[in-house]
Amino acid sequence: ARLPAFRDRVLADRLFLFRILAEVSIDSACATVAEVRKRGPDFWSEFELYLSDLSRLGCLALKGLQYGVAGTLCGFVGQGAANALMRAKRGLRQRQGHPPEEDEVPIPPLLKTALVWGLFMGVSANLRYQTVFGIESLVDRTVAKSVPALGYATTLAVRFGNNVLGGEQFVDLARWAGVQ
């Protein structure tokens, strides 16, 4: 199977696909009901705003897909290069008659590692980037107009924090997935 984790999940829970459909349907219905309740009689006159909210969710999903594909491709390239270097180093040591190093780590599986990168980029990096962009936009449209240095400081602080958080999250995810 091309997606063994998905296949195993479906086999382990015969209602899995139904549950996914139910979750998406219920979520969409509840969001619509909330919009109707909050907007009241203005719902239909503000229908474009409701569609705008749905469009934002679609954008988040599309960006997640784009980041996920990019992360998977970069995972293949990056881990492929790392694996090639590990094999070359070990082959060189072996040809020189050296025994394997005691603390030699196993070579990570290429496909699984690339998929972990894709998942990480599609979910974590996507959400974090959307948050960073939102914070920067908010600061730029408000206080940075009066104090431009605050815009620069915000960018540095938010992007630094984003990178630290992202690095920590990836290490945790990679260890959990068994690729590090």
Image (cartoon, helix red, strand yellow):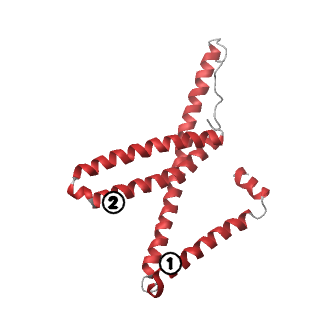
Q: Which of the pair 134/70 is nearer the observer?
A: 134
- Point out residue 70 in the picture as x, y percentages from the top left corner: 51, 50
**Which residue is drawn at the image coordinates 55% and 48% (left, top)?**
120
- Point out residue 128 in the picture as x, y percentages from the top left corner: 46, 52
The amino acid pointed to by label 1 is Glu
Q: Name the residue under label 1.
A: 35
**Which residue is drawn at the image coordinates 71% and 65% (left, top)?**
17
Numbered circle sitting on residue 138? 2
Q: Is residue 50 above or below residue 23?
A: below
- Point out residue 11 in the picture as x, y percentages from the top left corner: 79, 57
Q: Which image quarter holds the C terminus?
A: top right
Q: Which of marks 2 and 1 is nearer the N terminus?
A: 1
Could you classify mark 2 by the number of other residues whose Cα lies within 10 Å: few (under 14), some (14-19), or many (20 or more)?
few
- Secondary structure beneath label 2: helix
- Point out residue 49 in the picture as x, y percentages from the top left corner: 43, 77
- Secondary structure beneath label 1: helix
**Which residue is drawn at the image coordinates 79% and 62% (left, top)?**
14
The residue at the far bottom in this view is 41
In which quarter of the view is residue 172 placed?
A: top right
Q: Is residue 91 above or below residue 46?
A: above
